[in-house]
Image (tube, rainbow, N blue to C red):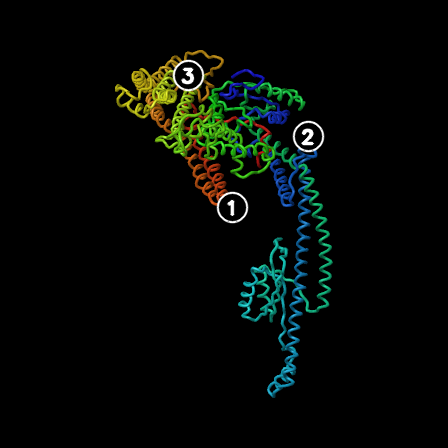
Amino acid sequence: MGDGSSGPTMDLLRSEPMQLVQLIIPIESAFRTISYLGDLGLFQFNDLNAEKSPFQRTYAAQIKRCAEMARKLRFFKEQMRKAGLSPSTKSLRSGDIDLDYLEVTLGELESELIEINSNNEMLQHTYNELSEYKLVLQKAGELFHSAQSIVAAQQSELELYNTTEQSAERSLLLEQEITMDPSKQVKLGYISGLVAREKSMAFERILFRATRGNVFMKQSVLENAVVDPVSGDEVEKNVFVVFYSGERAKNKILKLCEGFGANRYPFTEDINKQFQIISQVSGRLAELKTTIDVGLAHRSNLLQTIGFEFEHWNFLVKKEKSIYHILNMLNMDVTKKCLVAEGWCPVFARDQIQNGLRRATLDSNSQIGAIFHVLQTKQSPPTFFQTNKFTSAFQEIIDAYGVAKYQEANPSVYTIVTFPFLFAIMFGDWGHGICLLLATLYLIIREKKLSSQKLGDIMEMAFSGRYVIMMMGIFSIYTGLIYNEFFSVPFELFGPSAYGCRDQSCRDAYTAGLVKVHATYPFGLDPKWHGSRSELPFLNSMKMKMSILFGVAQMNLGIIMSYYNAKFFGDNINIWYQFVPQMIFLNSLFGYLSLLIIVKWCTGSQADLYHVMIYMFLSPTDDLDDNQLFIGQKFFQILLLLSALAAVPWMLFPRPFLLKKQHEERFQGQSYARLDGNDYPPEIEPHSVSHNHEEFEFSEVFVHQLIHTIEFVLGAVSNTASYLRLWALSLAHSELSSVFHDKVLLLAWGYNSIIARGIGLSVFIFATVGVLLVMETLSAFLHALRLHWVEFQNKFYVGDGYKFYPFSFASLGQDDE
């Protein structure tokens, strides 16, 4: 399909010439060969084992091994994230590392990190338990001390009362109480611990109901949250002490503590023992704190060491895994000890690929070199356009509609200019354009830093299309200068207005009462014409007619592109029976309308173009009278009308018959044709070629041509009308900007109050940014996108191809596992 060349082609409209290549690679050099092709990034491998599952392929074990190493790296990354560390972009080690050594290293580091985490968790659990135990000892001791003080006070009061007002009955009761058997006296037990504050009320209520009120519970609120030993989270808790009587009540309390997640701790009434236990717990906490800090420092050092090499290790594992994925796509020839690969590559990359094959053979000490063989095929090659960071966004706009088929004309070449220009027609305001330009310049200046960061979805789209938005801003400044609008306000940037008032009575006039006092305004719209109050405002009339002119020009460009495609592929039928009648039909009607607009502008005629175009069809032989713009116009209109009518059957009838004749001539005497170097023998003829022997369906071709003709005739009218959206959105943008300026900013500035002016200025800024710079930008962008996808590209662009996706290590850094 072509000889190797030293570089890419310079035809910007066509994708790179591609060739189907077969590589026969010795097994001993296969790994290095695939690695060098990945570094080159100009070879797309075809899967020759598509019928096999991933587990049935040759290198499934190696891929599983790489997947396990990738799992360990993800574990390290998660641990670094929890520790507040990030992988370093500068590796301490350069060059490749042996994968066996890397596998052992990762295993040792994982085991060590897991052991450190396990020990740290155990120590932290013990530390949290002792911290809670210390709090229980302190708070429960306060509760007991408070209760004992209250009991002592009550007993002293009771004794004082008995000595002063003792009765016979109370004496008997006291005597009975003293003589009672000590073994029959009721002994109270108690359970202490901590419960979550949010559960404390429910815990106390259910505890009361479960024991039928035969318990007494006392709680103390902790000022600060404590770390729960079980969950490891900070929780606000209360210290509780529950007094009970009997083993049955005790068992119920223990079950409720487990149900509510209350941690229980032992407690003694002896104050001396309390202080002794608190002292022991405090010492133990200090020791644990020191041990935990040492462990965390060791863990941090280990993670920092991993972080220095993480990106390098991660890339090596991804690279290794991707190479084995490619090797699994190749055919294994066991007898010849080689692998067979097939894939697509650009013609210009042939020498580079062959150099990579020779280098892999030398580096692997292979006795046999790899074989590079170009295959002849009728398969449609992938589409490969070489782009840079400026053109890639425009190419993505086209690819979103459909990828160009192989060697089809690429609309993105024209889109680089036409897309931002059509946007600017709708968005024309050089003040708003400057805002867009400044925003995109910020993204462009910081693109290196922003490209390495994770941005939000909306910000990511804006960043990827920063050069498109930059062009939109530049063109908006240009059209805004033509419209003479700066936030809807006209300025005399290029000199004074050419018009002035006759007297003081016309001071506020725009057209009436004005006389020309200076030379014509040199660039753009004269400031005095802005907001004209005539029947058809000049600016709106100009925008409407410009929309038609640009629309007809772009549709003509689309038809010319269809001619360019047909000529490139040698399709003379489409040239004479599609391109020619389409050009005649479109320009006989709408090209003539564009001509009338230009003539009217140049001559200053007052002719009614609506009347001219309507009666061109209704009464073509009538005199034009005041609507005549040039001599011989009536005869010229009749000629154009007849040409447009003749173009319809010209598009409809000849092409199906010519295709039928071509088909019959192509396959007449097929069985006696000799075999050329580019032909296939019948026994190995591809399936795609054998389809050409099917019977020619004339009815299907004719119906398809009929639909195509009707679509073009009706589309010529509807598409021309569709370009009027340029005028409509430009008018809407200008009016919205004028409303915000007049009804918000100027209205607020009319008040002699700083607060009112500040509020008005704030509303004006937010309205301008939110509505005009965000919503209007998005609206104009979508309408410009529609004009390119529908009105322009449907004239020539098929877009049924598929992209060229070469095997490249350059994309591994952007892919997630």
Question: What secondary structure is found at the residue carrying circle 3?
Answer: loop
Q: Say whether residue 43 is left or right of residue 694.
A: right
The residue beneath circle 2 is: 95
Distance (Cα) linking label 1 and label 2 = 66 Å
Badge 1, how many Cα within 10 Å: few under 14, some, many 20+?
few
As drawn, the label of residue 571 is 3
* Disc 1 target residue: 754
Closer to the camera in the image, 495 or 180: 495
What kind of residue is marked 1?
A: Ile
Along the viewing direction, whichever of 672 and 342 lies nearer the viewer:
342
Q: Is residue 619 above or below residue 159?
A: above
Crowding at dot 2, Cα within 10 Å, few <14 / some 14-19 / many 20+, comes out as few
Residue 33 placement (x, y as % from top left)? 62, 24
Q: Earlier in the sequence, mark 1 or mark 2?
A: 2
Question: In 3D space, how far apart are the residues under numbered discs 2 and 3 (Cα atoms)?
Answer: 54 Å
The amino acid beneath tag 2 is Gly
Q: In 3D space, how far apart are the residues under numbered discs 1 and 3 (Cα atoms)? A: 72 Å
Quadrant in the rendering for residue 529: top left
